[in-house]
Amino acid sequence: MEKEKRKIEQAGLSTISQNIDLISKTLVANAEKITQLNEEETQRLLAENEVLENKLTVLQDTYAELNRLPVWPFGRNTILKVASSQGIPLLGLTGIGADLLNILNSISPGPPP
């Protein structure tokens, strides 16, 4: 499950980075065109660049945030399995196991005889 989740996150990061790349290339292309345009076309292109720059900022922030999230190589179930397989024998070694068993028996005495 964790691997699937990470694959989805990676696919999202890949899509975001492709969009960042596309917008960046568009901005560069617009910068090269701007000197060859008349005033009206220049104003339209500048307005388009402003929208693209806003999108670029949002995408870069989102990418940075998603990339910052920790990805653990194990899930909650794995932690519980390891903790219970190691913790129960340790309870017996420390002497707490008998007390814990008595408490559990007092809460739930078990099946009737």
Image (tube, rainbow, N blue to C red):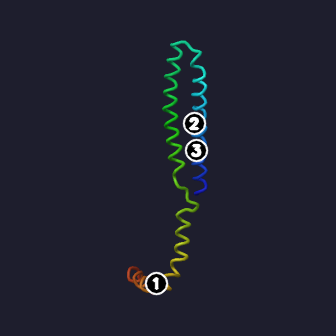
Q: Earlier in the sequence, mark 1 or mark 3?
A: 3
Label 1 sits on a secondary structure element that is helix
Q: Amino acid at mark 1?
A: Gly
Mark 1–mark 3 Cα distance, whole angstroms, equals 48 Å
What's the distance in space between the residues labelled 3 and 2, CA to CA?
A: 10 Å
User: Which label is found at residue 13?
Assistant: 3
**Percent of width and height locating residue 35:** 57, 17
Pick the front one: 15 or 27: 27
Residue 106 x/y as whole percent = 38, 83
| Disc 3 to disc 2: CB gap under 8 Å | no
Left or right: 3 as drawn, with respect to 103: right
Q: At 49% from the left edge and 85% from the top edge, which residue is drawn? A: 92
In the picture, measured across the screen, residue 20 lies left or right of residue 104, that is right
Q: Are marks 1 and 3 in contact (CB under 8 Å)?
A: no
Badge 3 density bin: few <14, some 14–19, many ≥20, Cα 10 Å: some
Q: Amino acid at mark 3?
A: Leu
- Looking at the picture, which amino acid does disc 2 mark? Ile
| Above-or-below relation of 28 to 58 | above
Mark sitting on residue 20: 2
Earlier sequence position, callout 2 versus callout 1? 2
Query: Please, which residue is most extreme toward the front here?
Result: 35
Determine which quarter of the picture holds residue 16: top right
